[in-house]
Image (tube, rainbow, N blue to C red):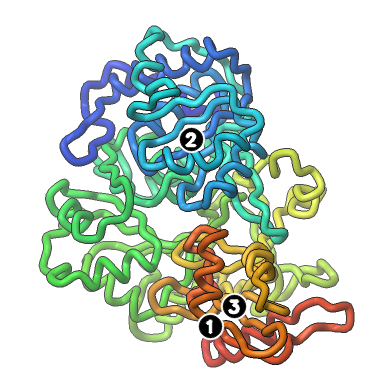
Amino acid sequence: MSWSLAGIIRPRARDQRPMITSGERALTWAEMDARSSRGAQALRAAGLAAQDRVAFLDKNGFEYFEVLFGGGKVNVVNVAVNWRLAPPEMAYVINDAAARLLFVGPEFLGHLGAMEGTLKTVEKIVVIGSHSRHEAYETWLARHPATDPMTPTAPGDVAMQLYTSGTTGLPKGAMLTNANLGTLIPYTGPLWGFDERSVNLVCMPLFHIGGSGWALVGMAQGARSVLFREFAPAEILAALERERITNALFVPAMLQVLAGVPGADARDYTALRSIVYGASPITNDVLVRAMRTFRCPFAQVYGLTETTGAITQLDPGDHVTGGPRARLLRSAGKPFPWVELRIVDPVTDAECAPGTIGELWTRSPQSFKGYWARPEETARTITADGWLKTGDAGYLDADGYLFLTDRVKDMIISGGENIYPAEVENALAEHPAVGDVAVIGVPDDRWGETVKAIVVPRGGTPPRAKDIIAFARERLAHYKCPTSVDFAPTLPRNPSGKLLKRELREPYWRGRERRIN
């Protein structure tokens, strides 16, 4: 039988151990099985067919997994919506996915009101909590029996659809299949020290592969998940000690904040088996300080949404802070045994020699099915013989370690969030005082990099930087908005008019060997 989301739950249908805890609330494996079966029956009663999409908009909560596993039991695809987006951006994702049902958490009813009139495919809205016009989630569940429909799934069926922005600035739905997830999830758990006695900290947003994928890795091994609605540093440090957390995943910005909390290094972390980190650049200072604070094995991972998450790992044994091997702290490690890597000349597509920088391509069963309803974009990303073009630049050394140096594409990664300059540039270009604009990523000690706008004023006196930032915040999610603005008389362009982003970035990154994680 092929791997499936439902296969995580079904073998533990009578297990009375806690599966997920959050604060004082707990849900057992048996309760999750029953509630996800009710959800599956409710989805079927609503007329959803196999591979139809439902959208979920809320911060981390039990309900996300109930809908995810319920969908898995009836072969319906969950689309987790980034709750940090502005309402028009949320509506775009929901419409693009052709979602027939929308689940909305209580904190986002204002967003729902702002976008409800623009939703094109949603037939029913279910509200977690209560609402004057829409059915409450608990009522929706309770109307249906806790009977698993046992709907079959195939390896190539889509299990999850996570949205990642594209170079045009419009989000794209990355289709992750049962085969994709079934390659990563069962096999990385033991690599990271998971078993049925593990206690897994889940604090990354579940609309990220680093949130939902990480949680599923632990669940597949029977671990208990300690779920945080969002990142809360002091509470997480307390939980690491109180709950005897064994496994955790953080982005570098989180590690920096956690290690900087007064008294963080005085707590008892002896239960920790490993901390996995990745998703954005990390400095040696932040990494070494975190290693000294938590005093447990560290593993760095690198991957994309399109690769179903991690495809390489820098093992704990490679985290050496002194001597010649200390250089490996700048590496993304080696590929998993089932993953192929190659470095390719971005002009000729010829394979590069060890030590030569080119674009990273990868091939493995983890490579996604493609972008939902975007066959041309998919064809540009995956070659005919199955190589996925990551858009990241780097090199492989003679020992097979991957070093990432830059990005072939212009994407900015800030605190683990992917930001595409074209989207921000389009928004800023609407400002009446902006004649021309370029958006780049610049180094930031906390977030890895942050967004900078370089503006050519229209006409006379330049606008104030804070007005440009405020203008962006009215139109975009805050994490996409510039944190600083510079003014210039002109922007460098090639003869065809294309912005020379590398020239713009160079002064800010000069002297830094590593420009990406």
Furthest-right residue in this view: 495
- Callout 1 crowding tier (Cα within 10 Å): few <14, some 14–19, many ≥20: few
Which of the numbered marks, if any, corresponds to residue 56? Answer: 2
Residue named by callout 1: 464
* Dot 3: element: strand
Q: In terms of secondary structure, where does tag 2 sit?
A: strand
For label 3, the crowd category at 10 Å Cα-Cα, with few meaning under 14, some 14 to 19 and many 20 or more, is many
Residue that badge 3 annotates: 453
The answer for how far apart the CA atoms under marks 2 and 3 are is 32 Å
52 vs 242, nearest the viewer: 52
Which mark sits nearer the N-terminus, 2 or 3? 2
Q: Which corner quadrant of the image does residue 445 belong to? A: bottom left
What's under tag 3, amino acid-wise? Ala
- Picture layout, residue 290 above or below residue 155: below
Q: Nearer the viewer, mark 1 or mark 2?
A: 1
> What is the three-letter code of the residue carrying label 1?
Arg
Task: Indicate the quadrant containing the N terminus: top left, top right, bottom left or bottom right.
Answer: top right
- What amino acid does circle 2 point to? Phe
Q: Note whether 505 is above or below 423 in the view shown.
A: below
Marking on residue 352? none
Q: Residue at x 58, y 39 (%)?
A: 161
Q: Earlier in the sequence, mark 1 or mark 2?
A: 2
Residue 154, compared with residue 474, is above or below; it is above
